Amino acid sequence: MKILFKHVLGIALVFSVLQFFIGALSYAQSTNPEISDVDEMLNVMANTFKNKIEDDFSAIAQFDIKDQKDSWHVIVKKGRSVIVGRGPHKQARFYFSATTDTLRLIYQGKMTAMTAAGKAKGSDNAPLNLELAEGLEFTPEIRTQLYTFLYRFFNPSLPERILLGEEYSRVVHGGHVVPLYYHPGFRSAWYLLKKGERLNEPGDTNPYPQAFIFIEGEGFGKIGDQTIRVKAGESYYIPPNSDHVVWTESDKPLVLIWLAWGEGA
């Protein structure tokens, strides 16, 4: 009887351990944002997107996944209807091209869509390439729709979260950048500069007002014709059409928030 009791107890113990590991595995799978299937990632994004848009928002976007040599599309209809379909769509306004790995990084929040799409020049390659439909003009309405897709559809978190840090950035315009929020008439980004890196070059000007807000480190800035020392806790206004170059000679990175506003931003 004692032997039988020990045998039953042993089986129960093994069963309990198995249940624990199965439960832990199920929990890890339910909380792990890693999804390998493009259909699933796009559908999760679409279902979250419904809660972010206005009732009158409508657009069609096509997603070309290069490594799978296949396409998907998302149709957004008025009334917050968001439908994911397989294959190209003839009426798509926006075309996004990326690999499955890039889409997964965006889905996991390790890179924003705007970070993946960032370019210093139109001829540069980016992990996420985007194009407008042929003949479509880049009007304020179209810009708003495109920014809505880039910032809100591609970010399945709610409230929307953007992670800041070198590991979530790409080097564009000479600095490690994470674009924050864009809207017609407003732009913002987080930048990190290491020793030897230079944000912008003399002659890289913009026709709208800007500002640098320094939050970590120290370095130098050239604003217009003046070269100045800059450090954390300072903010500088940049008039339209002015040079705005920033760099550091310190071993500690220089971190700043960039803002731009007004017509053309």
Image (spheres, rainbow, N blue to C red):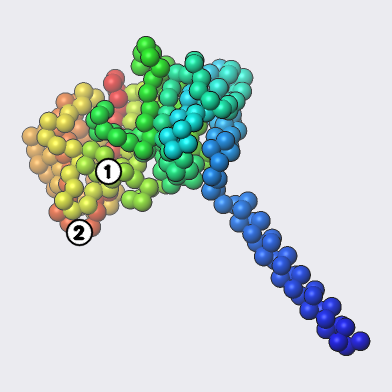
Q: Which mark is residue 251?
A: 2
Q: Residue at x 9, y 42 (%)?
A: 227
Image quadrant where one finds the C terminus: top left
Q: Residue furthest right?
A: 1
Looking at the image, can residue 2 be seen? yes
Q: Amino acid at mark 1?
A: Val
Q: Quadrant of residue 128?
A: top left
Q: Residue furthest bottom?
A: 2
Question: Mark 1 and mark 2: span between their CA atoms?
Answer: 18 Å
Q: Residue at x 37, y 23 (%)?
A: 131
Q: Which residue is mark 1?
A: 171
Residue 29 placement (x, y as % from top left): 61, 53
Q: Quadrant of residue 86?
A: top right
Residue 2 placement (x, y as % from top left): 88, 88
Left or right, 182 with respect to 215, comes to: right
Under tag 1, what secondary structure?
strand
Residue 197 placement (x, y as % from top left): 18, 47
Q: Residue at x 36, y 51 (%)?
A: 167
